[in-house]
Amino acid sequence: MILIINKLLLNKIYKTIKKYDEIVIARHVGPDPDAICSQIALRDSISLTFPEKKVYAVGVSVSKFKKFGSLNKPNYKEMTNPLLIVLDVPNMHRIDGIEDLKYTEILKIDHHPNDDIKARVDWTDINKSSTAQMVTELILNTKLKLNENIANNLFLGIVSDSERFSLKNTTYDTFDTVKELIKVSNIDFTSLYDILYTRPFSEHKFIAFITNNLVINENGLGYIKISDKDLKEFNVDVATPSNLINGYNFIDELLVWIFITEDVKNKQYKISIRSRGPIINTIANHYNGGGHKYASGAKLETMAEVDNLIKDLDTACKDYENK
């Protein structure tokens, strides 16, 4: 299943993990299921394999993701020689929950394009469907242990980031990894879909609100500005729009679509962007964001920045159509 060169890298990752008694596992701010599931699964696998180690999954908790498992709030001042493992994030400024951590070394596992994180051991592969797929391959091909809860989270992370195996990042490699995961863990994978896709009626009403208010222009750019008032009206949180955005992937008229959500608590606008053709992560990078070629995000402070981002994405749609 794994090429020889990857097996050497996976063994190097395993040996690095084995070397440290204190390990902090972090991911990007504004996490999605892939980030959370990968983080918790890797923590639990390391703890299961090495019960004597102190392993922590850190970052801001998201209430709707508590079903995947709980996060930790360690005292960094008590740590003497910690390893920092960063998952699903290529940018230092987007790592969540490590502000006061004095780590000894960084180990990185990610499927985004490389950015400014410099790790001695770095497994970056933009051809993987998800970071959860990569963590699955790490566990299946090293001495790291697996149980049902770990396997459940890994499956959910893969399914979520591939949008049920429908996005361009899904490959034969993805299916092969999932097959092996199900084979060795015997998880009831069909029932797990309920965790990701069963929603309260208020959220379905919110989906209808987005559909009815999404503006689509003649260049194939779609956008909606979602206010704090809108979130309260439908009883949803600020993370909900970004978790719904993939559902608009099959609209004929759309090339690029952007959800702009007001985040009153943090005094910013949470941006989620998806594309069916134009490359968008280079544009997101200009706005202190980032991501994949066809799935990116950012956090902006002013509506003027939001409007400039919309203009840049509109230009990208025009250029794409002209080419």
Image (tube, rainbow, N blue to C red):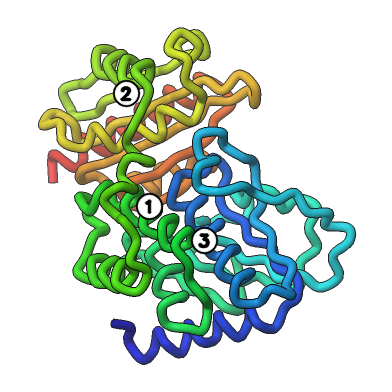
Q: Nearer the viewer, residue 213 or 7?
A: 7
Determine the residue positioned at 22% across, 53% down.
165
- Name the amino acid type tagged 3: Ala
**In the rendered image, the vertical position of residue 211 relative to residue 20, given as above or below:** above
In percent of width and height, residue 50 lies at: 66, 77
Q: Is residue 202 left or right of residue 145?
A: left
C-alpha gap between disc 3 and disc 2:
34 Å
- Name the amino acid type tagged 2: Tyr
What crowding class fits label 2: few (fewer than 14 Cα within 10 Å), some (14-19), or many (20 or more)? many
Toward which corner of the image does residue 27 lie, by quadrant? bottom right
Determine the residue positioned at 13% across, 28% down.
253
**In the rendered image, the vertical position of residue 322 relative to residue 231, given as above or below:** below
Residue at disc 3, secondary structure: helix
> Which residue has dot 2 on it?
223
In percent of width and height, residue 282 lies at: 40, 49
C-alpha gap between disc 2 and disc 1:
28 Å
**In the rendered image, the vertical position of residue 183 relative to residue 271, given as above or below:** below
In percent of width and height, residue 264 lies at: 61, 19
